[in-house]
Image (cartoon, rainbow, N blue to C red):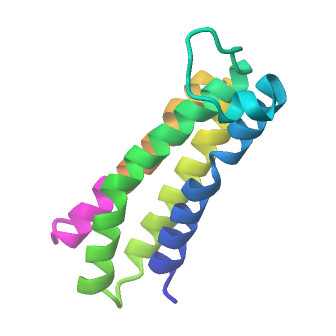
């Protein structure tokens, strides 16, 4: 398995499980049946960190929508190139750090970690296009 494949799969796996902390908070705050109920304006609000976790998870999903196809394209077109693997690693580091930094409420680092992930996608696409 190449580094590109590994970090693309690791990113997908992280996004697939990143909902767990805020659902656990919902269960703790609202109880099991309250967590399973449909959204309602009179529902007990979740913890502030859990609201931030939901937002961070949404950002990660949206970022992966752009990254995933570019990574697959790079896997097919440039299997021997090591640079895409480094970019996949920086994407993963960026979205993973973004989630936890967002949960902690650290605003400047949150933006920088998201920029790392986003710029990794841009650089990967430019590499796949042969620009860099």
- Quarter residue 25 falls in: top right
* Residue 79 falls inside the magenta stretch: no
19 vs 49, left or right, is: left
**Residue 77: image location, x then y, percent:** 23, 84
| Frontmost residue, 113 versus 66 | 66
**Residue 123: image location, x then y, percent:** 31, 58
Instruction: Identify the residue at image location x=71%, y=25%.
Output: 49
Instruction: Identify the residue at image location x=67%, y=23%.
Output: 105
| Above or below: residue 94 compared with residue 27 | below
| Frontmost residue, 55 versus 128 | 55
The secondary structure that dominates the magenta segment is helix
35 vs 75, left or right, is: right
31 vs 79, left or right, is: right
**Residue 91: image location, x then y, percent:** 48, 57
**Which quadrant: the C terminus?**
bottom left
Residue farthest to the top, as pictured: 42
Residue 102, can we see it?
Answer: no
Instruction: Identify the residue at image location x=55%, y=54%.
Output: 15
Instruction: Identify the residue at image location x=22%, y=71%.
Output: 128
* Start-end of magenta stretch: 122-132
- Quarter residue 71 falls in: bottom left
**Residue 120: image location, x then y, percent:** 39, 55
Residue 111, can we see it?
Answer: yes
| Above or below: residue 56 compared with residue 45 | below
| Above or below: residue 31 compared with residue 3 | above
Give the number of marks: 0
């Amino acid at each position: 398995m190449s580094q590109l494949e590994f970090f693309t799969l690791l990113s997908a796996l992280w996004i697939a499980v990143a909902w767990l902390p805020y659902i656990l908070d919902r269960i703790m705050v609202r109880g099991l049946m309250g967590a399973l109920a449909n959204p309602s304006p009179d529902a007990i609000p979740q913890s502030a960190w859990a609201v931030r976790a939901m937002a961070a998870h949404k950002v990660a999903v949206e970022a992966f929508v752009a990254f995933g196809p570019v990574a697959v394209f790079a896997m097919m077109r440039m299997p021997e190139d090591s640079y895409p693997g480094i970019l996949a690693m920086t994407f993963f580091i960026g979205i993973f750090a973004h989630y936890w930094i967002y949960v902690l409420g650290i605003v400047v680092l949150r933006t920088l970690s998201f920029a790392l992930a986003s710029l990794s996608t841009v650089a990967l696409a430019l590499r796949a296009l042969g620009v860099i």
